[in-house]
Amino acid sequence: MKPAIYFASLIILLLGQIAWGQGLSPNAPELGKIEAEFLSQNSPSLKQRVETSLADQPLGERKSIQKAFLLSAILPGAGEYYMGSKARMLLFGGIEVLSWTGYLTYHHKGKVKEVEFRDFANEHWSLSDYLKFVNDEFLIDTRYYGHYTLENYNPEEWDSIQTYLPASFIHDVIDAWKHDKQQYYEMIGKYYDYQFGVGWDDNIQPSDTLYFWKSNEAEDYEDKRDLSNKFLKRAKWGIGAALVNRVLSAFDAALLAKSHNKRADRFSGFSLRATVIDYYGEPTPQIILTKRF
């Protein structure tokens, strides 16, 4: 019967404390002695257990939502660490490390291959041979003969020059060479069969009017360039993953802070204290809940 009596007494006393803000102890002067006797017989005591659990609860302590958001926006996982979530910190921090590792790895591979395919093109494709072919084959009987060269070229003449070239000759290689090297290196490989094949060392000139050249060097070159582009594209995926991870981490930290503050507001002004009272001759545990208004 005693456990039931203790439990019923505890509920009654707890409700009484909430309503009146004071204990139901008819023998208040004897509290110290009774509590000491009770605690000496109960190890670990109720008081120790309750006060220990309360010490672990940050009741009433608010966190800055803006700070949590900005910390994770700057460094994914930092906002989660600020909120005390080590698991989430490791998750977002780990994704960040993997994203940047992937970017640096593939960016380096892509740039190495870029140097490789450009060196290959400079060795096996000749801009001067291509321009000589265009002038001798298509412009020799026009007033533009000798104009389409690195030294004499006027970009404003391209439309007029193009009217004398085959329909497939649509790319202005001189303009690309001077102003957009990336486009230049793309042209000479991508459009070698219908326009730039004559510039490759091993070109086989066709007999038809479409100038459908064959070149193993051009195909090898395209393979190298494609591999470089593939690596650089994967590097961009790393950047994209890092940005997405940063946004997700920032909002996750902000939501953690918001959820934490809701709990803190719910218990703001409350305090709990455990003690032992003499309840009609029996040492009885008491939990006191108070609320500040």
Image: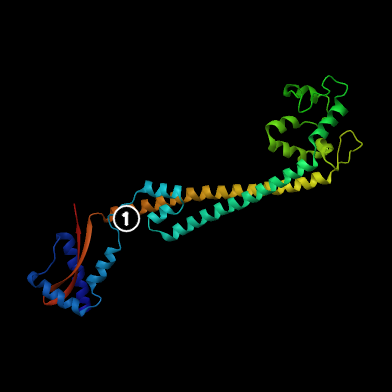
Q: Which residue is mark 1?
A: 263
Circle 1 crowding by C-alpha within 10 Å: few under 14, some 14–19, many from 20: some
Q: Position of residue 250 (x, y in %)?
A: 44, 49
Q: For residue 51, what is the image quadrant?
A: bottom left
Is any part of residue 252 visible from this angle?
Answer: yes
Looking at the rendered structure, the kind of residue marked 1 is Arg
131 and 214: which is toward the camera? 131
Q: Residue at x 72, y 36 (%)?
A: 184
Q: For residue 130, what is the image quadrant?
A: top right
Q: For residue 98, what is the image quadrant?
A: bottom right
Q: Position of residue 6 (x, y in %)?
A: 20, 75
- Residue placed furthest toward the top: 143
Direction from residue 71 to residue 20 in the image, left or right: left
Instruction: Please state the total of marks drawn on the protein image.
Output: 1
Quadrant including the N terminus? bottom left
Local SS, label 1? helix
Q: Residue at x 72, y 33 (%)?
A: 177
